[in-house]
Amino acid sequence: MEVAGIGVKLNKIYSKKTLATNLAGFGYSTIISVAPMFVVIGAVLLMQIFLGFSRVGYAVRELYSCTVLYIFIFSLLTASPFNAVLSKYLSDIIYLDKYDDILPCYYVGMAMNILLSAPLGIVFCLREHFVGGVEPMYVLLGYCGYIALTLTFYSMLYLSICKVYPIISGFFTAGMTVTVLLSLMLVYWFRVSVTYAMLASLDVGFLVIASLEYALVKSYFRGNSGRYREVFRYFKKYWQLVLTNFLYTLGLYMHNFVFWTTDMHLVVAKSFVCMTSYDMATCLAMFTNLSASVIFISRVEMYFHERYKAYSEAVTGGRGMDIRETKSRMFEQLSDELVNLVRIQFIVTVMLFFLCMIFMPQFGFGGLVMQIYPCLTVGYFILFVMYAAIIFLYYFNDLKGAVFTSLAFVLATLAGSLVAIHLTPMWYGIGLVFGAFVGWSVSYIRLRWVERRLDIHIFCKGNLMKRGEGKKPSNLVYKRGKEREGA
């Protein structure tokens, strides 16, 4: 019911096909799908205002800020190798109506995610305590927040497949409400220090969200087929998805990691490394362009998917003329969607950019942050368009092209950022611009390559005989009479 309601609403908004309705569709899609992120940011800001965070010592503030920054970045990085394959597996079993296979996928994916995330977090926390001298309780709170957020992001994957975005937003609102109220209680009733209270409250809030998400997953999918091995087979079969998603996520932060190595970086507790001005400009630039993914996903589901479905049906039971016509219409729609994404997102980005340039200095985000921000905004604009092209490569099962795109993006971003550190602040973000442009170019060239070779990909792959494992049979198919008698 929830999914149908969202689809009907978006169809009604986009049906008029005007600029105003496109922007309205963007606004609605953003509210229902990106709201959780803004709820978390709002909760963090409210705690800082109500608890007098600005009056806390500089070193303590920086330790807290770096802890929260690392919790978010590395929980996303450690989850990235698994999400794409799990999404593929979920989509396939939902298409086949094998809902009893979802819980095995959920448990296997969670185990793999924790087995990767937990040890890496422990190694860092040991260094934070023994080398950085951070108190054990503070280290433990940071580690718990990291694990809780990892579980939160992981369960969101399954609920996002079901498109219950309003429910996800409700869970985040409940969790962050608990966070703000608990932080006030800890500080003003139990006299806990501000940073300890804020970090502990975030841990509890993330744990509440993860628990609610897990409960909803269990309520939706109650059967368990016990087919755990199928999930591992998907990781073996679609290993390119693991590589693509990890490289893409790594590329999102590669330019930050390069600037963390410069003389402008800040080291906290001999463990955390950051460059506050660049990291803040990155955050603003990413939020400025974040709507691109929402616009793309909603429009693809409304328009391109129908053309793709029509082509698939023509391939399985249509005439040659039907196949050629539906293929042409499908790629026309693909081009239209990319052009529409650039057009709409450009308008949104320009509007948000000017608002940030006008109002952000009044909230203390001025100086170096606003010098770096414009170039990074351009970089993330191109980056999200590149990601749209990667999604289209997924549609045509060109996993090799997706790997090439993400690898080119990471390497070009790394090379460009190594050059950018020697430039003036206005051009610090040129590494991301260069990397995203190279990645977009590779993805576009690959899409055109797929278009030219799609018939070969569809009709010239496969086997006449079922594949199997074992001893290769003899290639002898016939013997003449005398040879048979002699044998």
Image (spheres, rainbow, N blue to C red):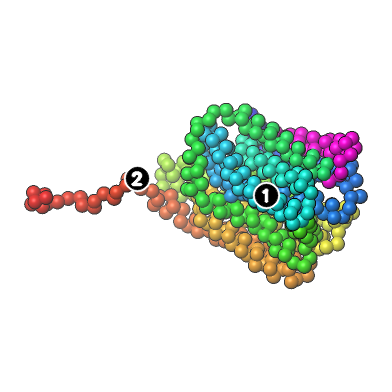
Mark nearest the camera among 1 and 2 is 1
Instruction: Answer with left or right where residue 331 lies relative to residue 30.
Output: left
Instruction: Answer with left or right where residue 225 lies relative to residue 317.
Output: right
200 or 285: which is nearer to us?
Answer: 200
Residue 122 percent across, percent down from the top left: 67, 49
Q: What residue is pinned by disc 2?
A: 468
Q: In the current view of this chain or complex, which residue is farthest to the bottom?
A: 422
Residue 341 percent across, percent down from the top left: 66, 51
- How crowded pointer 1 is (Cα within 10 Å; few <14, some 14-19, many 20+) is rated as some
Q: Going 91% across and 50% down the picture, which residue do you hit?
A: 55
Q: Residue 121 — which label?
A: 1
> Predominant secondary structure in magenta?
helix
Q: Going 50% across and 59% down the picture, which residue do you hit?
A: 449
418 shown above or below 25: below
Q: Quick check: can you spot residue 182?
A: yes
Q: Quadrant of residue 437?
A: bottom right
Assign a secondary structure to mark 2: loop
Magenta stretch contains residue 24? no
- How crowded pointer 2 is (Cα within 10 Å; few <14, some 14-19, many 20+) is rated as few
Q: Are marks 1 and 2 in contact (CB under 8 Å)?
A: no
Assign a secondary structure to mark 1: helix
194 or 73: which is nearer to us?
Answer: 194
Inspect the image, locate mark 1, and give the three-letter code of the amino acid beneath it.
Gly
Mark earlier in primary sequence (1, 2): 1
Inspect the image, locate mark 2, and give the three-letter code of the amino acid beneath it.
Gly
Q: Which residues are magenta?
A: 166-195
